[in-house]
Image (tube, helix red, strand yellow):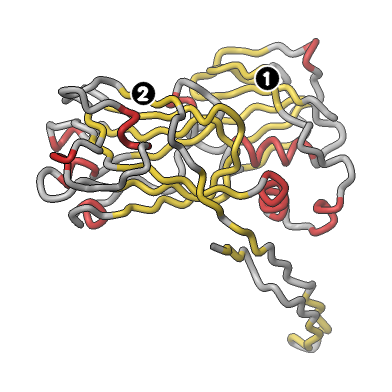
Amino acid sequence: MAHCEGILLEKNLLIFLFGILVWFYPLSCWCLNLTALDLRGMQASQSSVFRGYSADLAIDGNPNTNFKKGSCSHTDNDVHSWWKVDLGANHCLGSITLVNRNKCCIERLIGAVVRAGMESDIFNNAACGLPVTSDQASIPGGHIRVVCDPPVIAQYISVDDDVSYLQENWLTLCEVMVEEYSMEECLQTTTTDMSTAAMIGDPSLSITCMSTLMFVNKQVTNARPLSVANKKSPMQCFMYCKMNDECWSFDYVMTSGQCRLSDVKAGDLKADDQPGCLVYAVVRG
């Protein structure tokens, strides 16, 4: 499956607008290939297990939506039910599809949130797309595709549900299917969000340049950040830092998307308490 972010053909336009000559720069497009990621055999877990319907049944490669056939995971009626899988390595995720059960109880997926990120604690990872809607959950055996836009680099994928008004937080997944981009394509896609094609060819951009030293609920102690911007994910904030030669660390507020760049290096990094914030130091390869 190919995914185009813009227009493949470059178009340079010169027009007169109110008597002024205006130049429209080329629009670029990255047509990316999504490939299925085989989750079979990966380590899956969930908040609880109902009558032996364990988490691994959601990644057994069998999308049968008949719950009685024994190929669906199922939690108890937890306060905040969740399911997750450890991918074992970093992957660039483009979409995650949830396969709902057939017949009974399909509405239980209403409000379910798909998350992806680097943290084993799923609630520290950002959501991909929007929560499952009532329309999506109303189709028996429905395949609910959640798009990660922008793509996210992640080791963990999770689904959690705490829709209190239903008074039932059972979580059943008959299959979870994932599509990914190559890491090279992923970095290109993330970089195009910075709105300049010159960044694509930046020789300093390297897959070895990853963020480390993550502190949860902390913000960088720096009264004068290099730059402040809103980004959709910690990965976008990381790439924003990578494009600034002075940036050696950054913090990201999960609730607002605020991204602050800092010139503080790992050895000098200090952080203050700030709930909902993530702090990273950057390793430049």
Identity of the residue drawn at 78% across and 72% down: 26
Res 18 label: none
Return the residue at label 2: 45
Q: Does 17 sit above or below residue 276?
A: below
- Image coordinates of residue 96 in percent, x first then y, are 43, 46
- Image coordinates of residue 12 in percent, x first then y, are 80, 80
**Residue at far left of view:** 104
- Image coordinates of residue 125 in percent, x first then y, are 49, 30
Tell me the quarter of the picture where residue 135 sits: bottom left
Return the residue at label 1: 220
Disc 1 packing (10 Å; few <14; some 14–19; many ≥20) = many
Q: Earlier in the sequence, mark 2 or mark 1?
A: 2
Tell me the quarter of the picture where residue 127 sits: top left
Q: How many marks?
A: 2
Between the residue at mark 2 and the residue at mark 1, the CA separation in whole angstroms equals 33 Å
Figure quadrant of the N terminus:
bottom right
- Image coordinates of residue 253 in percent, x first then y, are 55, 30
Q: Secondary structure at mark 1?
A: strand
Which amino acid does the dot numbered 1 rest on?
Val
Which amino acid does the dot numbered 2 rest on?
Ser
